[in-house]
């Protein structure tokens, strides 16, 4: 199943209370940003298609191009089978209309194959461990660990994900904690240890801080 109804929005209040208790520097950020608004999605295939579209171009441009891509399918819902069939013959019209490079088209084909043959087990993703999900996704061409971690955070809402390679998180932590330079993976992991078991929510607040405080 490539699409399901949205799940109920999770209650992040325990995470917010925990972060406020264990990390005093998070308290003013939480007060300024407000409640955590992460909510799960179940349109796994569409989410991952858009992640591929977004690579190496601005989010604004990717949104426009992905919108054109969705317009090509009934009810704007690209399914694994429809996408695979549309791209399997190297359809030039699709590539031109969507600004889709041949490399990204090959990534979408590979993603479709993984959904169609069950290598991405959509019915079990919600019950799989974080690393199991990552291992399943990074087998797809064009999907690396960072994309898999974003999927864990924004789609599955796993509560304790810390994307160590995310530059926005590293820069935000540098600013919040007054560090002389961006922390490396080891330093970031040690600093965020206090956030467990809600490192996802701590990460989200650091990200949101950059937007809210700049406004």
Image (tube, rainbow, N blue to C red):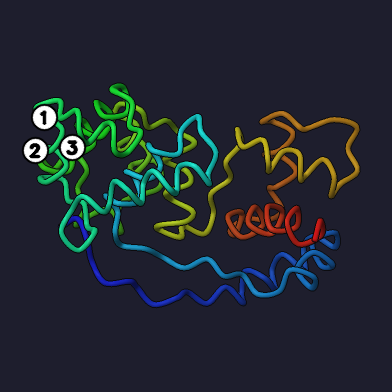
- Residue 210: x percent and y percent? 75, 53
Asked if the residues shown at circle 1 and circle 2 are in contact, with their CB atoms under 8 angstroms apart, the answer is yes
- Residue 156: x percent and y percent? 40, 58
Asked if the residues shown at circle 3 and circle 2 are in contact, with their CB atoms under 8 angstroms apart, the answer is no
Q: Which mark is residue 114?
A: 3
Tag 3's secondary structure?
A: helix
Tag 1's secondary structure?
A: loop
* Disc number lying in front (3 or 2): 2
Spatial CA span between label 3 and label 2: 14 Å
Q: Give the mark, 1 or 3, whose residue is nearer the N terminus.
A: 1
Residue count near mark 1 (Cα–Cα under 10 Å), binned few <14, some 14–19, many ≥20: few
User: In the picture provided, is 170 more to the left or to the right than 38?
Assistant: right
Q: Nearer the viewer, residue 176 or 57?
A: 57
User: In the picture provided, is 152 more to the left or to the right than 111?
Assistant: right
Q: Which mark is residue 85?
A: 2
Spatial CA span between label 1 and label 2: 5 Å
* Residue under pointer 1: 88
* Disc number lying in front (1 or 3): 1
Residue count near mark 2 (Cα–Cα under 10 Å), binned few <14, some 14–19, many ≥20: some
Q: Residue at x 9, y 39 (%)?
A: 117
Q: Residue at x 49, y 42 (%)?
A: 61
Tag 2's secondary structure?
A: helix
Q: Quadrant of residue 48?
A: top left
- Residue 36: x percent and y percent? 61, 70
Q: Which mark is residue 35?
A: none
């Amino acid at each position: 199943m490539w699409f399901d109804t949205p799940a109920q929005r999770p209650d992040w209040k325990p995470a917010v209370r925990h972060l406020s208790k264990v990390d005093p520097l998070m308290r003013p950020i939480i007060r300024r940003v407000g409640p955590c608004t992460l909510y799960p999605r179940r349109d796994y295939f569409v989410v991952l298609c858009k992640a591929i579209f977004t690579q190496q171009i601005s989010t604004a441009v990717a949104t426009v191009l992905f919108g054109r891509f969705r317009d090509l399918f009934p009810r704007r819902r690209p399914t694994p089978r429809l996408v695979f069939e549309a791209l399997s013959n190297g359809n030039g019209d699709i590539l031109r209309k969507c600004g889709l490079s041949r490399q990204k088209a090959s990534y979408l084909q590979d993603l479709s194959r993984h959904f169609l043959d069950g290598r991405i087990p959509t019915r079990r993703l919600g019950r799989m461990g974080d690393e199991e999900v990552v291992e399943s996704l990074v087998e797809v061409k064009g999907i690396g660990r960072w994309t898999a971690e974003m999927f864990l955070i924004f789609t599955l809402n796993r509560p304790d994900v810390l994307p160590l390679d995310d530059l926005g998180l590293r820069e935000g932590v540098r600013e919040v904690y007054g560090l002389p330079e961006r922390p490396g993976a080891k330093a970031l992991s040690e600093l965020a240890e206090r956030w467990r078991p809600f490192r996802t929510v701590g990460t989200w607040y650091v990200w949101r801080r950059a937007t809210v405080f700049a406004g």
